[in-house]
Amino acid sequence: GTPMQGYVANPNRAKGSVHNYGAAVDVTLLNQADAKVDMGTPYDHLGLLAQPRYEQKFLKNHKLTDKQVEMRKLLRKVMVECGSMKMIRNEWWHFDFLRGKPLRNRYKKLDITFDELHKIRKRINRDEKAQ
């Protein structure tokens, strides 16, 4: 193992991660100028400061600002209340649609390479331009 093991699921395990099923998203907020909103840490920051469960602690010791926590709460509200997603406790940007057995019963694990994914994305872009 590694200290970062809690942040990364092994896609080669039989179950994989929720991302492997297409049932998880990593998102942030953008302002009106299409710039990322300051959430206190960069997207994919693997550390305690990114974990929602410690926000009040970091707010008290001034490692997070009121505005940063407010923006994280807004993101959670939109994703959980309006998007029917579930948050996780160690990444402010990660949300799941389903987990565990209900996920595996409903969807198949996607097992495609990055090359295949890139080809799919190119095809989608081509189709969008044609419309």
Image (tube, helix red, strand yellow):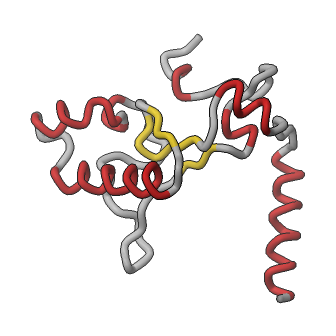
Please say if 39 is above or below 8: below
Q: Which residue ends up furthest to the bottom in the rendered image?
A: 131
> For residue 67, what is the image quadrant?
bottom left
Q: Residue at x 33, y 56 (%)?
A: 74
Q: Residue at x 78, y 37 (%)?
A: 106
| Residue 120 x %, y % | 86, 61
Is 11 left, or right, of 47 in this rendering? right
Q: In front here: 103 or 16?
A: 103
Q: Residue at x 35, y 46 (%)?
A: 41
Q: In front here: 17 or 2?
A: 17
In which quadrant is the C terminus drawn? bottom right
Is 122 left, or right, of 5 in this rendering? right
| Residue 5 x %, y % | 55, 20
Is 67 left, or right, of 8 in this rendering? left
Q: Residue at x 48, y 16 (%)?
A: 3
| Residue 92 x %, y % | 41, 43
> For residue 126, what is the image quadrant?
bottom right
Please say if 34 is above or below 59: below
| Residue 118 x %, y % | 82, 58
Is 33 left, or right, of 113 in this rendering? left
> For residue 61, what is the image quadrant?
top left
